Image: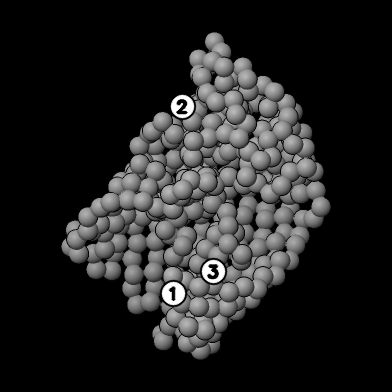
Amino acid sequence: SLTENNGKATAAQATGADSSQAGQIFNGVAYIGVSNVTFGALTFGRTMGIMADGIARFDPLSGSYAFSPLGWSGTAPGGGDTEDKRLDSSAKYDLNAGPLHFGAQFQAKTSANPGTTQEFVLGVNFAGLSLDAFYEQKNDAIAAASLSAAQLTSIAGVCGGTAATGVVCDTDITKSLSGTISDNTTYALMGKYAFPGNAATVFAGYEQIRYQNPTDPILAGQNILGGYILAVVNTQSGAGSTYANSKHLAISWVGLKYSITPKVDLMGAYYRYGQNNYGVTGVKGWTPGCSSNASGDCSGAENFLSFVADYHVTKRFDTFAGAMWNQVEGGLSNGFAFATSTIDPTIGFRYSF
């Protein structure tokens, strides 16, 4: 979807977004492993990240694409960037020992993954309460984007193997993208409590992501997920770099799921994203203390409020209806040309195989 917008003016673009799936045939998970009741499970291959597992478990709306920003956006489950929601060439270990559980995951460097990933979780389950603490470190995380018209005209030199890069890559614009590179450090605390009888469950979570310039910068021509190429790479060091000042993104949520009957569930949740002002004076219109929409580097926030009713017709078939209110302000509203607040109702049905 990003390459479809390469070189197009904003008004001419269709919806486009980065993803951990990237149009691959096998874009979910694919792994092999061993498990033991006492010693836990060890898997190798393409697996969900530990942070993504936690989001799926502690999101009040279970990662819904229609009603939850934790579901349709991979920022939170990917520890800063959606491409890290699912991890290729990773080893993952899970252990449950009584009320305690522990998990660890490591992703090695590959030709399409220039940086390593480490993820950990430590949690406890006791008398209806589940509480998990998470840590993730991703080096050379990639946020891909469409090429501007100016960037599109510049990639021939990059992909032809210039003296500056020495890289030879595909000049086909259907595979070429731009990218912002960062080292991401993430901490999170997530929990839920099921009241006696399990009719009602309360959910809450907090995630703090710190974006910094990469310690090992990536050159243009880098292969990435799905066979795509970073033909243009944003500045990664110095005063004009994207993260000359560290960016801090805080994500928090609270919600409730209540079963009126065994067949009818009501769910409601509030989510908030908030970022600091991390720009550099004189760059992209940013000024110290900026909290306006003059630049995406300015401080800002995004709020979401969702309500959903879900009716289980059978074990595998259910219908649902609900709405999500969304509002952006400050730096996070930069680029919103038409509206900074919306209400999106959705009605649908689902059959689970």
Which amino acid, by three-letter code, is at mark 3? Leu
In the picture, which quadrant includes the N terminus?
Answer: top right
Of callouts 1 and 2, the N-terminal one: 1
Say whether residue 42 is left or right of residue 199: left
- The quadrant holding residue 190 is bottom left
Residue that numbered label 2 is attached to: 216
Q: Which residue of the protein is positioned furthest toward the bottom in this rendering? A: 261
Residue sitting at 30 percent across and 47 percent down?
44
Of callouts 3 and 2, the N-terminal one: 3
x, y (%) of residue 350?
A: 54, 72
Say whether residue 206 is left or right of residue 342: left
Residue that numbered label 3 is attached to: 61
Which amino acid, by three-letter code, is at mark 2? Asp
- The image's mark for residue 193 is 1
Residues at marks 1 and 2, CA–CA distance in whole angstroms = 42 Å
Q: Which residue of the protein is positioned furthest toward the right in this rendering? A: 338
Residue sitting at 28 percent across and 51 percent down?
32
x, y (%) of residue 33?
A: 25, 52
- Under circle 3, the secondary element is loop
